[in-house]
């Protein structure tokens, strides 16, 4: 059995140097909090590496470095980052969940990117998931992911943690 954490970002950041990439610890709250998790289970993490890369050789280099740490990158295009993360996640869901209705921005392309990226996360995670694993999905950027994984892996244990307020049913 292993624990597979799936989050928008990996607990590390990738920095580009002159001729390579360097993996550095992230100072983000989720990475810090879950980094202290004590378990005998093998831990894996799936998420965006925080860098936009188009070149396949560079993606391969980053993937190899991250796989050594049991981290599995989900590479996103610049347009996906803009529409899925900045768009639907942070301009639609976040203000809605915080009752900031005046700040909600919705565009069809935001929703489409959100759906596509959740599907991409599912496709990237599935090869690492076995029936006796625990899959722990983190936050509002991946709200569609539990069902997508359940459809493909009906026996796996799936947990979802929503890190922001959840609006009342009246919305």
Image (cartoon, rainbow, N blue to C red):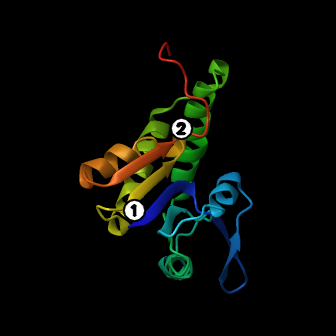
Query: Residue 163's x, y, as percent?
Result: 60, 40
Query: Residue 155's x, y, as percent?
Result: 26, 53
Residue at the top extreme, as displayed: 170
Task: Give residue 94's mark.
Answer: none
Q: Residue at x 64, y 26 (%)?
A: 98
Disc nearer the start of the sequence (2/1): 2
Q: Which residue is mark 1?
A: 125
Q: Residue at x 70, y 69 (%)?
A: 25
As rendered, which of 159 and 127 lies closer to the eye?
159
As rendered, which of 43 and 148 lies closer to the eye?
43
Secondary structure type for disc 2: helix
Any part of residue 75 in sight: no
As rendered, which of 63 and 30 lies closer to the eye?
30
Question: In this picture, is 28 found above or below 139?
Answer: below
- CA neighbours of label 2 inside 10 A, class few (<14), some (14 to 19), many (20+): many
Question: In this picture, is 130 found above or below 166?
Answer: below
- CA neighbours of label 1 inside 10 A, class few (<14), some (14 to 19), many (20+): many
Q: Residue at x 38, y 67 (%)?
A: 1
Query: Residue 91's x, y, as percent?
Result: 61, 34
Instruction: Say left or right for 21 vs 39.
Output: right
Q: Which residue is mark 2?
A: 88
């Amino acid at each position: 059995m292993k624990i597979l954490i799936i989050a928008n970002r990996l607990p590390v950041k990738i920095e580009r140097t002159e001729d390579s990439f360097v993996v550095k610890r992230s100072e983000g709250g989720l990475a810090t909090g879950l980094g202290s998790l004590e378990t005998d289970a093998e831990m894996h993490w799936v998420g965006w590496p925080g860098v936009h890369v188009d070149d396949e050789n560079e993606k391969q280099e980053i993937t190899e470095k991250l796989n050594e740490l049991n981290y599995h990158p989900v590479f996103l295009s610049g347009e996906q980052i803009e529409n899925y993360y900045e768009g639907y996640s942070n301009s639609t869901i976040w203000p809605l969940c915080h009752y900031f209705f005046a700040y909600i921005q919705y565009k069809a392309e935001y929703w489409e990117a959100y759906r596509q990226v959740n599907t991409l996360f599912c496709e990237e995670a599935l090869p690492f998931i076995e029936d006796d694993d625990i899959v722990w999905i983190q936050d509002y950027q991946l709200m569609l992911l539990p069902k997508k994984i359940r459809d493909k892996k009906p026996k796996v244990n799936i947990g979802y943690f929503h890190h922001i307020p959840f609006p009342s049913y009246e919305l």
